[in-house]
Image (cartoon, rainbow, N blue to C red):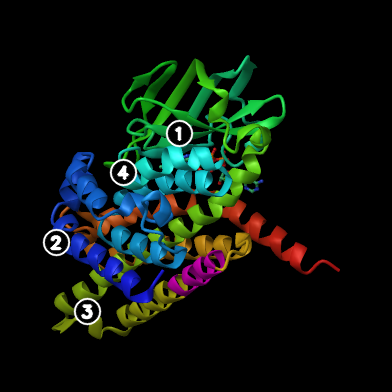
Amino acid sequence: MDAAVAEDLVEAVRRFVQREVLPVADELEHADTYPAELVGKMRDLGLFGCTIPEEHGGLGMDVTTYARVVEELAAGWMSLTGVLNTHMMAATLIRLHGTPEQAGRWLPRMAAGDLRGALSLSEPDAGSDTRALRCRAEPDGDTFVITGTKMWVTNGERAGIVALAARTPEGVTCFMVEKEPGPRSGGITVSRAIGKLGYKGVETVEMSYDGHRVPASAVLGGPTGLGRGLPQILAALELGRVNIAARACGVARAAFEAAIRYAQQRHTFGVPISSHQAIQFKLADMATKVEAARLLTASAAAKLDAGERADVEAGMAKLFASETALEVATEAMRIHGGYGYTTELPVERYYRDAPLMIIGEGTNEIQRLVIARGLLRRYET
Ligand SMILES: Cc1cc2nc3c(=O)[nH]c(=O)nc-3n(C[C@H](O)[C@H](O)[C@H](O)COP(=O)(O)OP(=O)(O)OC[C@H]3O[C@@H](n4cnc5c(N)ncnc54)[C@H](O)[C@@H]3O)c2cc1C
């Protein structure tokens, strides 16, 4: 993407966050309200087409720019990045692995934000351990009948298309399941809305498939996609991990900025607390880690932009940035003293949002396994 165009886009998102998001984020978060108006504005900005190629009506954004956009949104309100992330991953799956017919059918509507996407890999008893997936899709003529329960489906209710991992005789297959947005569609039911510590306003739901029938054309990539679901989804997770890393950078940056501003305003013992060396050391460590996290994220994004596998780099960025967000949000709260523990300032939101990043798109324990395996492959003797 042209550098000037990328800069304009990031600047437009920054303005949107300043003018539209920050004034309402805390209120929407505390009321756990879906931000319909903000999502409408994100759609007007073209953000549902971020990484979708221009030939399909998207912005054709490179991953580097996408990461910057996600950081800006997350610095305002992390939940907004949740509305985008699994949508972009579903679109990425179609772009990377779909047939030309599938790309032409779904991507233009997804780019316009008329068709919203979700990604549904996890189950109640299968998160890190994808071998334990139980949801199955039985072939029946030129259709498949899907039965099972899926857990943690972000955007599951409002989505019109779900990238779903289900077992077929060939192994795990990725189906692009079209549905009506809402609590029920055919044999699909939103069986539970999951209450969360943070990341409110965006829905995360349990979904039951009770003999839901889909056409064979829903198999991602056509007949050759049968049994290829896990490698397809794992490749798309590299983009997801850069997204989580970028989100973590946004939350960490917001927490740091809140802390450094507060430290200059709050006085104890006759001086601003920013004059105390103990606070200065905290601020120095926080800013250093935020900068390091951003550089790791940019480096992983650049690798994906170069068309290379980035399992190690995306894993490192996700691991470091998410641990940084957790640490910086905690330190920001400490710097705010008692006020940091109230719902009157956004620092408590950063503290509740940050832990999601150590879990989502593969926990940090799994991230370390992914990084180590990649390194061992690279240094094989
Ligand atoms: C708010 C939210 C939104 C989500 N959105 C989605 C979504 O849209 N789509 C989707 O498919 N999923 C989604 N997820 C699911 C998420 O990806 C899983 O929660 C995550 O992969 C962890 O799986 P689990 O919760 O089953 O934990 P488990 O796999 O049960 O892990 C429990 C603990 O054991 C550790 N552990 C597990 N295996 C190992 C191992 N081999 N070595 C060392 N430690 C290990 C883990 O690191 C963790 O600490 C979401 C989760 C949350 C909380």
Q: Is residue 350 above or below residue 231?
A: below
Residue 287 relative to residue 270: left or right = right
Q: CA distance from mark 3 to mark 1?
A: 50 Å
**Pointer 3 or 1: first along the chain:** 1
**Pointer 3 or 4: first along the chain:** 4
Q: What element does badge 1 sit on?
A: strand
Label annotation for residue 273: 3
Residue 232: image x %, image y %?
A: 61, 44
Q: Amino acid at mark 4?
A: Gly
Q: Residue at x 13, y 56 (%)?
A: 23
Write down the region rendered in magenta.
294-305
Label annotation for residue 227: none
Q: Is residue 149 above or below residue 128?
A: above
How crowded is the residue under tag 3: few (<14 C-alpha within 10 Å), some, or many (20+)? Answer: many
**Pointer 4 or 2: first along the chain:** 2
Observer-side mark, 3 or 1, equals 1
Residue 35 relative to residue 227: left or right = left
Label annotation for residue 19: 2
* Residue behind label 1 places its C-beta within 8 angstroms of ligand 1: no
